[in-house]
Image (cartoon, rainbow, N blue to C red):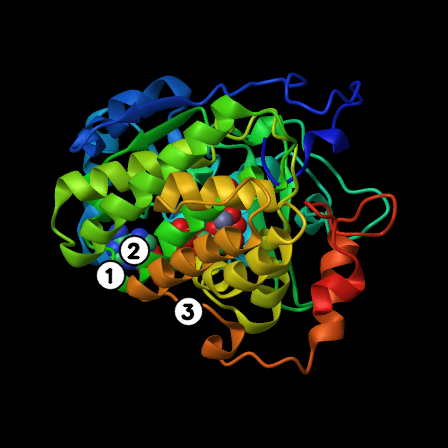
Amino acid sequence: MWYLPQCHLTHTKKLGYAMNLEYYNPTRLVFAPGALTRLGALARPHGVKALIVTGGGSVKRNGTFARAVASLKAAGVDFAECAGVEPNPRITSVTRGTATARAEGCDMVIALGGGSVMDAAKVMAAAFYYDGDPWDMILHGQPKPYIPTKALPVITVPTLAATGSEMNCGAVISNAKTQEKSFVQSECLYPVLALVDPELTISVPKDLTAYGVCDLITHVTEAYFNGVDGTPVQDRFAEAVILTAMEWGRRAIAEGNNLEARTQVQYDSIVALNGWVNSGTNGGFPVHLIEHTISAYHDVTHGAGLAAINPSWMRFAARHNTKKFVQFAERVFGLKSNGAEDLECALAGVDRFEAFLKSIGCPTSLSELNIDDKLFSRYVDDTLRVLHDQNGRLPGRPAMSEADIRS
Ligand code: NZQ
Ligand code: ZN
């Protein structure tokens, strides 16, 4: 359902259309403006002492942390704290949080922050039961990654709409020492509860709101463009996610205090990557995997990195999968084609998408992030080391060879 195409997980007969799927998502979603007050009551059945994981301080400054603690206390839940998780969370923070959870006798983990905090919290929860180095869990080309099977219960309380981490089983972690950023995916990482209160996202600044919009759109475009043919339901879901993000994302960026806009964008971000929209599409996530490598070297904000890569990747892929790009151009941007293989229309759709990204303040090229091509060979090698198909190419449609990624 997530970064790994299902073909890596199951061996089913290839039909050419999507009726080979398994769907599982045990995370309970409680979604409502104001829901933070229910944290204590909803957490109490899962434990008596929480490790609360937070980032660089936004939740302290805007009062979210104090309100969360008050709700926990009222329900008789004690807590210890792991603060200071970085954007593009480091494995060193995971190790630190795990040590605190063990020393303090925590029996659950509560993530109060953006995707970085939630991802770090998930890996801390799994590392709690693992005596080895938690980096063993993150796919980085090692011969035998350790895939966790047990974790402390995790409760996610997202403060930024973007990653969908609150309701999925993945986590993305960086290693500053080795300049790697990659992921782990395991059923035990599904949070037991996603407590989603859109009021908590009101304080997210314009640029991060826009990057979140790009991230959530890319979660569905990856599956839409890289997946198998014959997925009409998934296609329409994905188009709804994109159109909603474009309409309500603009408003959330223009009027940060607009709770309705924040609410629609946040629900959209959850739907985009909780597995349902993408189920059965069986595609790769090439734009994400390339972005992870770039982030590993340059510590860029995830959604900004995706925005910078998307237009060139799309122009490359549109030549191979023209029909799908024509569908995108027609259904998302209302363009009219001369037929399913109308490359001009397909590319016009990409132009429109790029214009949308620019209009919300996203970069649309790596040079806008001050990234040149000096280290490009390393980016390509590193990306392919994390994940490649049997022919050594990056999974996607088309699968990308070294030369394709470089171009
Ligand atoms: O650290 P604090 O002080 O909290 O500030 C954060 C951070 O600086 C700030 N922020 C968060 N909530 C805020 C706020 N500022 C003001 N008001 C609020 N309410 O936002 C900054 C970025 O936070 P971060 O958590 O890094 O952002 P995001 O949610 O975009 O998460 C990005 C991370 O998630 C990974 C990315 O690779 C990246 O490491 N991803 C995780 C996925 C998953 N687990 O499913 C999928 C994604 O594709 C993605 O790869
Ligand atoms: Zn993403």
Q: Choose the circle earlier in sequence order: 1 or 3.
A: 1
- Determine whether 340 is above or below 234 in the image: below
Q: Judging from the image, what secondary structure is the residue with disc 2 in?
A: helix
Q: Residue at (24%, 61%) from the top-left corner? A: 205
Q: Residue at (13%, 54%) from the top-left corner? A: 255
Q: Is residue 107 visible?
A: no
Q: Judging from the image, what secondary structure is the residue with disc 3 in?
A: loop
In the rendering, at what x and y percent does residue 310 appear?
52, 58
Q: Choose the circle earlier in sequence order: 2 or 3.
A: 2
Determine which residue is flagged by label 3: 363
Q: Is residue 301 visible?
A: yes
Asked if the residue at tag 3 contacts the one at tag 1, i.e. Cβ–Cβ closer than 8 Å, the answer is no
Give the quarter of the image for residue 287.
Answer: bottom right
Q: Is residue 238 left or right of residue 140?
A: left
Q: Residue at (72%, 45%) from the top-left corner? A: 395
Q: Nearer the viewer, residue 80 or 167?
A: 167
Q: Nearer the viewer, residue 134 or 231?
A: 231
Amino acid bearing label 3: Pro
Image quarter of the N terminus: top right
Q: Judging from the image, what secondary structure is the residue with disc 1 in?
A: loop
Determine which residue is flagged by label 1: 205
Asked if the residue at tag 2 contacts the one at tag 1, i.e. Cβ–Cβ closer than 8 Å, the answer is yes
Q: Residue at (51%, 61%) from the top-left corner? A: 311
Label 1 CB, ligand 1: below 8 Å? yes
- Determine whether 208 is above or below 82 in the image: below
Q: Nearer the viewer's eye, disc 2 or disc 3? A: 3
Residue 209: mark? 2
Q: Is residue 4 left or right of residue 253?
A: right
Give the quarter of the image for residue 15.
Answer: top right
